[in-house]
Amino acid sequence: MVVEGTLTLARSAVRLSTGSGSSDPYCIVKVDNEVVARTATVWKNLNPFWGEEYTLHLPLGFHSLTFYVLDEDTIGHDDVIGKISLSKEQISSHPRGIDSWINLTRVDPNEEVQGEIRLELWVLEEPHRRVLHCHVIEARDLAPRDISGTSDPFARVSCNGQTLETAIIKKTRFPHWDEVLEFDLEERELEKETRGPLLSMEVWDWDMVGKNDFLGQVEFSLDTLQKSPVKGWFRLLPFPSAEEDAGGKLGALRLKVQLAEDRILPSMYYQPLIELLVESILCPAEEHVTPLAILEEIGSVESRQDVAMKLVKIFLGQGLAVPFLDYLNLREVTRTSDPNTLFRSNSLASKSMEQFMKVVGMPYLNEVLKPIINRIFEEKKYVELDPCKIEMNRTRRISFKGSLSEAQIRESSLELLKGYLSDIMESIIGSVEKCPPIMRVAFKQLHKRVEDQFPEAEHEDMKYIAISGFLFLRFFAPAILTPKLFNLRDQHADPRTSRTLLLLAKAVQSIGNLGLQLGHGKEQWMAPLHPFIIPCVSHVKDFLDKLIDVDTGEAQPRMLFHPSATIKEGYLHKRKAEGLHLVTRFTFKKRYFWLSSETLSYSKSPEWQVRSSIPIQRICAVERVDENAFQQPHMMQIITQDAEGQLHTMYIQCKNVNELNQWLSAIRKASIYNERMLPSCHPGAFRGSRWTCCLQADRTVHGCSRTHSAVTLGDWSDPLDPDAEAQMVYGQLLLARDKLRYHERSFQDCRMAATARLLDVIQDLERAHSAFERREKEEAATESY
């Protein structure tokens, strides 16, 4: 049984207040002390809009989610504008999620604590006295306070007016003290009524010059300690802060955050639900009253996108994605009387087609659009057709011969747009063989359904518009408009490039609409592009005819990706840990990496025939590396175990924090079911006869930091997980149970029978969850004795 926490962040925007009057803001998202995401930088803007959405798979024991807003500085360190910290309890208290503006708070170094401390505390009765023994063993993952990326920590223990300190351990975030501090306890102190914590354990960073820096604290009730000893790891906490926020003086961040904690049951418990959904498409005797149809009727509009994604993955896992989409599309088409409104609403059919394209078509999208998008970003040409938005002062950047007239600017812009559009359309039209076969089969079925429903000559184009409405309007055009959100770029476009992309997206939309709306909109200044768009329409129809010319008799694969298919690839810099002495940047070799569900392989270049490979099942940890280990940022380590049980480490450097997070996440997900995953590792390197993190001289000593294999980013390449997907569908049905009961009372025959079967499945799953919950409580109670 697995319990999984998933968090989704979306629609991020911010109103900032800075003294300079300008800012280049971006956001960092942290789960406890682990950086999980970094948004793009929005240049020169105090009201940036990111619109970035992340799904994070989190460990059950996480404590908080923190958002830092920073101002990027090309010289020196980036300035922190403010932060928002949400505890797990705060997020969990909003079952429907948080969606609001939240004021930024100041970032006080004394509050930026992290890490844990390991302690043993007990009261010992001795002749004529009682003694409190405080065994301060070690700490891990402390906040770095020095320029070197480390700290010089010591512990200070206070008990009833007495204060003792441990030794100072220099240059580490993982100190080992192993000291026992003793406190004499007077009888009257123990007899006092407990009035809050009486023992305080603080960790400080020692500074030779200036004040010591606070690293965190943990407090205990002396009354509790005398009843039973305390032993284990304890999370370090900040000093209590009196200031809730800065009253909006620093600005505000708009967040949409939702936490879903689900108990994932063994597969056998979800089989009846999956069989019921599959039956809806394989045996739809009364197609309008199937369980799947009822699921659409009772679901909320807000949850429809999530439900669509889960259903797409469930049916992909069953090898029935095309019949599933065909079933929904047929229902949509037969319910539509006016062909001009076909798939215009956010129905389950339209959402499922949209999510299906993202799940199976993202590699195809990247192959078709990425080279052209990259060129547009690199060229940064000034393009504008709207006379109201032409900025004459930009003309000097266009021509060194002097200022251009408005007409000349529009003519220059028109030629640039036609050039870009020509390349985009040529790439799309020539991509028939690159399109995944399963997408082509789905489009072929859609084409047939629309043609059968609207056979009239005046509706001849509808069978094309139905496909192009998804492929062009909901796939290609949005990716051109915001390439960052489709993994085509690491950063958002600057204002000039963004305007070019907007104009291109508008043109691609017009082409996807087969030119039917040309001349009817308010943007008549787009008219100069019409002579280019109109000829493209016939090319698009030819492209769609070729796209659906595919054999539908082939069995659909049960797996989304073949085991040997590449999940992620790209250039990285690597070095092995063996022989690690003086480390320079030249010891890192540039290599091209491929990740599949079976191997992580690399070679000198994509064309190089000789590859080195690491079997995925031998990976036992994938973790970040402290910057001070190599004086290099954005580094990770891959720890493997050979047949003899020996551990080997490969260090890899990425070009930025986003690439680092993506590779960490991808390799963790590929190796998540490995049997020998390590619970701890060293975030430093063994150099100069000791570990740079914990300063231990034994190279084989157990790791000093916890591993984070449970923290991953969700994306289109996630492996299929039918149990987790079925659990989410069950959760939606459970929320809508009252609606189901109303359906059961209000209708007769087939509808009532289908609803009753859904209610039976919900009841059985609810009982199974209750049984597992009782078992967990019984096991926890047994372990406590």
Image: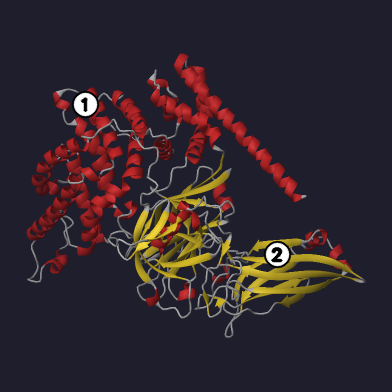
Going by the numbered disc 1, the residue's amino acid type is Glu
Circle 1 residue: 451
Circle 2 residue: 219
Crowd tier of the residue under label 1, counting other residues whose Cα lies within 10 Å: few below 14, some 14–19, many 20 or above = some
Quadrant of the frame with the N terminus: top right
Q: Nearer the viewer, residue 391 or 332?
A: 332
Going by the numbered disc 2, the residue's amino acid type is Glu
- Name the side, left or right, on which 164 lies relative to 647: right
Q: Position of residue 255 (x, y in %)?
A: 45, 52
Q: Nearer the viewer, residue 443 or 337?
A: 443
Q: Position of residue 519 (x, y in %)?
A: 13, 41
Asked if residue 82 shows in the view, the reply is yes
Residue at 38% from the left image edge and 42% from the top image edge: 560
Most distant residue in the top direction? 749
Label 1: state its secondary structure: helix
Q: Position of residue 122 (x, y in %)?
A: 79, 65
Asked if residue 515 shows in the view, the reply is no
Of callouts 2 and 1, which one flags the residue occurring earlier in the amino acid sequence?
Answer: 2
The picture quadrant where one finds residue 253 is: bottom left
